[in-house]
Image (cartoon, helix red, strand yellow):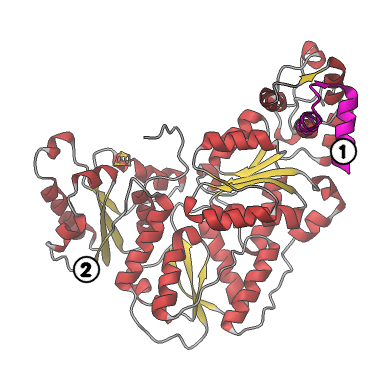
């Protein structure tokens, strides 16, 4: 048992629902207790789809458990076929149904339905949503893909985009147009918008573009092994990675890697003088491994941030994540426990968090700027406007999204210079976000109530309980701009501990500053 309040991923059958809902002509019969239809809302409310997911739930109740739940399943499967007449069906069990062991695959096969029926074996108690999606696409592909000749022109498949995927819709559009510029047509994009007939002709493409390893890698590997289709390894998030991706695709397809970059604005935006203040800003990055690793590269190499924390919640990608974190000189945080993530954020004292919906809540509590880079996300991250993360337009979107929550350069100076001002006091947030920049009460200016930065300082203080800050040193510390104060405090305490000093004076503060500046 594990006490859990927030989970980064749902159970694996939600991953299977993401594949079924992404596709057309597929129906999913899910053996599940009454109430599991809550998952419909993910698609109809968060992703705002205008139809119910193509899922029939058996919705068994407590009273059914004493009777024949297997017959209930068979009736539901037959009814779903009669009503929806899908080209293919997937059948499986949710967590509770897994316990009653009715074997949906075996039961469905006794019905002799006139369409392929693909059984899913998703271990709900050991795996999660992304695994469920990855496994479902693989199971469907294995069952449906047919050996066929390659297309005459050079084509590729795009793998991994699902329903409820973070910006999948626009990423597929952006990458499709990039490939077209290179003279490469898309054979099939799957599972998003593909039909079972489309999966049958996956092997006709010359190679595969794997956009989301979390949900498409098993299929890409299977197609490579079974149909000799190589697949791309670079995830085109950020300008540098997009150029690498173009080079990789050009090599696979034997075409020229020349692509028009006229609409790419990120490099100039971040090189322009207004972005100088972004250099060295401390950023903590957390999400699914693919988005987090890609974000780290953009943050350091394209915007000039300092990556002070990097991690992911999906353990399947722990190894590449650890290797990536090493490159940034940090220890990878592999955890699906948001409390652990929160503690790591407090310890790293970043000025910006790039994360999921969970980190948005953590950032709010701690008063730190935050932008969303990965699922799980809420409704605002399924925007109406075109907002890819991938390709050159995706790079533009990343720049705007990540910079927006930060206090602007001039304002940062004002907040530091006039920290006792009625408007530009320490606790005031970025004025372009409104609300927070209300005048602080006079008493609060003289003696600020603990703000988020102070809370972080207090947490660090608890760790360094053996140390004592003298009032003068404490006052001096407050002169340091709020966004680097927590780091200055930590460094000073680390320095004092190393020197065996228990009382921190102004001198200790400046000695530590000189020490770390070397
Ligand atoms: S079957 Fe799984 S998803 Fe459904 S209510 Fe039970 S624990 Fe939740």
Mark 2, other Cα within 10 Å: few <14 / some 14–19 / many ≥20: few
Residue 417 appears in which quarter of the rendering?
top right
- Look at the magenta stretch and give its main secondary structure: helix
Residue 430 appears in which quarter of the rendering?
top right
Residue 261 position, x and y percent, is 72, 69
Element type at mark 2? loop
Residue 355 position, x and y percent, is 59, 44
Whether the magenta-drawn stretch holds residue 507 is answered as yes
Residue 67 appears in which quarter of the rendering?
top left
CA distance for labels 2 and 1: 72 Å
Give me the disc on residue 515: 1
Which residues lie in the magenta part? 489-518
Front: mark 2 or 1: 1
Front one among 261 and 490: 490
Q: Earlier in the sequence, mark 2 or mark 1?
A: 2
| Residue position marked by numbered label 2 in the rendering | 115
Mark 1, other Cα within 10 Å: few <14 / some 14–19 / many ≥20: few
Q: Is residue 203 above or below residue 499?
A: below
Residue 161 position, x and y percent, is 47, 61
Q: Is residue 346 above or below residue 150?
A: above
Does any portion of residue 17 appear in the rendered image?
Answer: yes
Residue located 46% across and 44% down the image: 46
Label count reads 2
Q: Residue furthest left?
A: 67
């Amino acid at each position: 048992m594990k006490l859990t309040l927030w989970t980064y991923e749902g159970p694996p059958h939600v991953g299977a629902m993401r594949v079924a809902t992404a596709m057309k002509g597929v129906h999913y019969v899910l053996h599940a207790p009454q109430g599991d239809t809550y998952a419909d809302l993910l698609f109809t409310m968060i992703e705002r789809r205008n139809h119910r997911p193509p899922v029939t739930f058996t919705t068994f109740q407590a009273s059914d458990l004493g009777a024949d739940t297997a017959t209930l399943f068979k009736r539901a499967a037959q009814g779903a076929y009669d009503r929806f007449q899908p080209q293919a069906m997937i059948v499986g069990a949710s967590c509770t149904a897994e316990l009653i062991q009715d074997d949906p695959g075996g039961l469905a096969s006794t019905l002799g339905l006139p369409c392929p029926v693909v059984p899913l074996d998703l271990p709900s108690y050991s795996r999660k949503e992304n695994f469920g999606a990855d496994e479902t696409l693989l199971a469907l592909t294995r069952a449906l893909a047919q050996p066929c000749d390659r297309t005459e022109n050079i084509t590729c498949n795009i793998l991994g985009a699902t329903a409820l995927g973070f910006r999948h819709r626009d990423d597929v559009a952006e990458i499709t147009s990039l490939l077209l510029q290179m003279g490469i047509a898309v054979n099939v994009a799957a599972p998003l918008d593909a039909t079972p007939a489309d999966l049958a002709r996956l092997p006709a493409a010359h190679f595969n573009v794997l956009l989301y390893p979390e949900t498409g890698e098993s299929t890409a590997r299977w197609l490579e092994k079974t149909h000799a289709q190589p697949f791309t390894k670079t995830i085109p998030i950020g300008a540098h990675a997009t150029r690498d991706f173009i080079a990789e695709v050009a090599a696979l397809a034997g075409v020229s890697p020349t692509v028009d970059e006229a609409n790419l604005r990120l490099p100039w935006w971040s090189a322009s003088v207004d972005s100088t203040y972004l250099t060295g800003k401390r950023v903590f990055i957390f999400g699914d491994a693919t988005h987090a690793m890609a974000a780290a590269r953009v943050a350091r190499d394209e915007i000039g941030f300092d990556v002070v924390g990097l991690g992911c919640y999906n353990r399947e990608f722990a190894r590449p994540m650890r290797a990536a974190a090493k490159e940034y000189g940090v220890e990878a945080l592999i955890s699906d426990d948001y409390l652990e993530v929160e503690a790591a954020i407090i310890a790293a004292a970043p000025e910006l968090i790039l994360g999921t919906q969970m980190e948005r809540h953590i950032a709010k509590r701690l008063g730190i700027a935050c932008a969303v880079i990965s699922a799980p996300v809420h409704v605002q991250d399924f925007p109406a406007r075109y907002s890819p993360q991938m390709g050159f337009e995706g790079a533009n979107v990343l720049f705007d999204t990540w910079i927006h929550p930060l206090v602007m350069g001039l304002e940062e100076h004002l907040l530091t210079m006039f920290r006792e001002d009625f408007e530009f006091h320490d606790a005031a947030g970025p004025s372009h976000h409104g609300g927070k920049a209300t005048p602080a009460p006079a008493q609060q200016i003289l003696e600020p109530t603990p703000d988020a930065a102070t809370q972080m300082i207090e947490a660090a203080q608890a760790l360094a309980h053996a140390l004592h800050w003298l009032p003068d040193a404490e006052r001096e510390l407050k002169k340091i701009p709020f966004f680097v104060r927590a780091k200055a405090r930590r460094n000073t305490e680390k320095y004092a501990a190393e020197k065996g000093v228990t009382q921190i004076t102004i001198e200790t503060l400046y000695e530590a500053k000189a020490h770390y500046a070397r």
